[in-house]
Image (tube, rainbow, N blue to C red):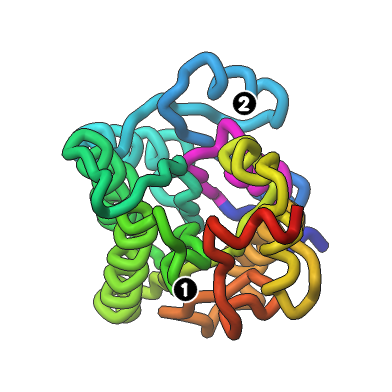
C-alpha cells in the first residue's frame, strides 16, 4: 500500500529542485499535494506536470503565509497532514564583504519565512501532522563564505526544535533534513567549479554526494506514519559528512 495514501500535503518551494522532486515522490506514494512558490510561471508548469494543486506566494510576507494556510484548508477540506519547506536560494560572500541588502534578503528567505511556515502550517493541522524543514550541512559544519546562509539555517534549525517541543502536545511533529550538496539547479554553478565535487566527495565517508531521490526518500518517511514517534530531530543526509569537515575554497584546486 502507498505510504502516504490519503495524506494532504503542502510543499513550499515545490516548483523546482528538491521541492519539485519531493512533490513527485509524495504523489507517487498516494498523497494529494499543493505546491507553493514565488515564480508563478514555473509554479504553473510544475503543477501541470505533476498533477498538483498550486498557490503562488512569497512566505517572507506574513500575510502571504496566512493566505497559503487558508488556501490549503480550502483545498483539503479543513486540514493538512504534512507540510515541507524546501524554499531557499544560495548566495556566498565573506563576512568582510557583506552588504545589507544581501544579508537581509537571506535572513528573510531562510529564517523569517521559515518561522512563518511553521506557524501557518501548524494552524492548518487541527488533528496533528508532520512539519519538515529543509536545512543544510553548512548549518552544522564550517563553510567559509556562507555566514549569512548557514547562520540563518542554523537559527531556523534551533527554532524548529523549539517548535517541536511547543507543538508536540498537539500531535504535530517538527523535524529537519540537512543534506550535504545535492546536484540541483540551485548549486549547479558551484558544482561546475573545478575540484568542488571531488573535494566534497573526499570529505564524505561514503565517497559520493546524495541524489535528489535520497532526499525525497527521507521526506516521504518523515511524512509517513512510519516516523510517527520521530520529533525534534535533525537528519543529516550527508553520507557521514557531519563527522568530518567541509573543504575550504582554496582547497578546490588540488582536486581539480
For the residue carrying disc 1, how many other residues have a C-alpha within 10 Å: few (<14), some (14-19), or many (20+)? some
For the residue carrying disc 2, how many other residues have a C-alpha within 10 Å: few (<14), some (14-19), or many (20+)? many
Left or right of residue 128, residue 66 in this image: left
In this view, the residue in front, 43 or 236, is: 236
Left or right of residue 119, residue 71 in this image: right
Residue 129 appears anywhere in the view? no
User: Residue at the location (53% across, 63% down)?
Assistant: 248
- Marked residue nearer the N-terminal end (2 or 1): 2
Query: In the image, residue 192 lies at what x, y percent?
Result: 69, 40
Query: Which numbered tag is attached to residue 98?
Result: none
The residue positioned farthest toward the top in the image shown: 41
Give the magenta part as a residue range.
8-25
Asked if residue 9 is among those painted magenta in the image, a careful observer would answer: yes
- The label nearer to you, 2 versus 1, is 1
Measure the alpha-carbon separation of dots 2 and 1.
35 Å
| Quadrant position of residue 129 | bottom left
Query: In the image, residue 61 lies at what x, y percent?
Result: 22, 35
User: Relative to 19, is 230 above or below?
Assistant: below
Query: In the image, residue 234 lies at what x, y percent?
Result: 49, 76
Query: Which numbered tag is attached to residue 141?
Result: 1
Query: Which numbered tag is attached to residue 47?
Result: 2
Amino acid at each position: 500500500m502507498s505510504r502516504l495514501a490519503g495524506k494532504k500535503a503542502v510543499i513550499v518551494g515545490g516548483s523546482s529542485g528538491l521541492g519539485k522532486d519531493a512533490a513527485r515522490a509524495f504523489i507517487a506514494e498516494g498523497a494529494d499535494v499543493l505546491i507553493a512558490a514565488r515564480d508563478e510561471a514555473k509554479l504553473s508548469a510544475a503543477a501541470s506536470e505533476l498533477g498538483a494543486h498550486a498557490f503562488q506566494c512569497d512566505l517572507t510576507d506574513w500575510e502571504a503565509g496566512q493566505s497559503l494556510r487558508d488556501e490549503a484548508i480550502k483545498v483539503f477540506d479543513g486540514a493538512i497532514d504534512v507540510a515541507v519547506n524546501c524554499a531557499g536560494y544560495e548566495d556566498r560572500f565573506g563576512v568582510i564583504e557583506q552588504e545589507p541588502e544581501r544579508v537581509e534578503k537571506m535572513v528573510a528567505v531562510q529564517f523569517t519565512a521559515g518561522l512563518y511556515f511553521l506557524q501557518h502550517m501548524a494552524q492548518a493541522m487541527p488533528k496533528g501532522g508532520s512539519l519538515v524543514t529543509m536545512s543544510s550541512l553548512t548549518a552544522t559544519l564550517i563553510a567559509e563564505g556562507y555566514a549569512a546562509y548557514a547562520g540563518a539555517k542554523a537559527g531556523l534549525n534551533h527554532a524548529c526544535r523549539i517548535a517541536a517541543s511547543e507543538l508536540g502536545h498537539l500531535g504535530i511533529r517538527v523535524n529537519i533534513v540537512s543534506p550535504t550538496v545535492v546536484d540541483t539547479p540551485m548549486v549547479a554553478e558551484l558544482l561546475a567549479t573545478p575540484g568542488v565535487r571531488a573535494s566534497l566527495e573526499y570529505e564524505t565517508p561514503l565517497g559520493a554526494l546524495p541524489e535528489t531521490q535520497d532526499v525525497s526518500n527521507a521526506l516521504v518517511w518523515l511524512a509517513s506514519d512510519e516516523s510517527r514517534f520521530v520529533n525534534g530531530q535533525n537528519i543529516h543526509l550527508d553520507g557521514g559528512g557531519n563527522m568530518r569537515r567541509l573543504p575550504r575554497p582554496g582547497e578546490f584546486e588540488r582536486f581539480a
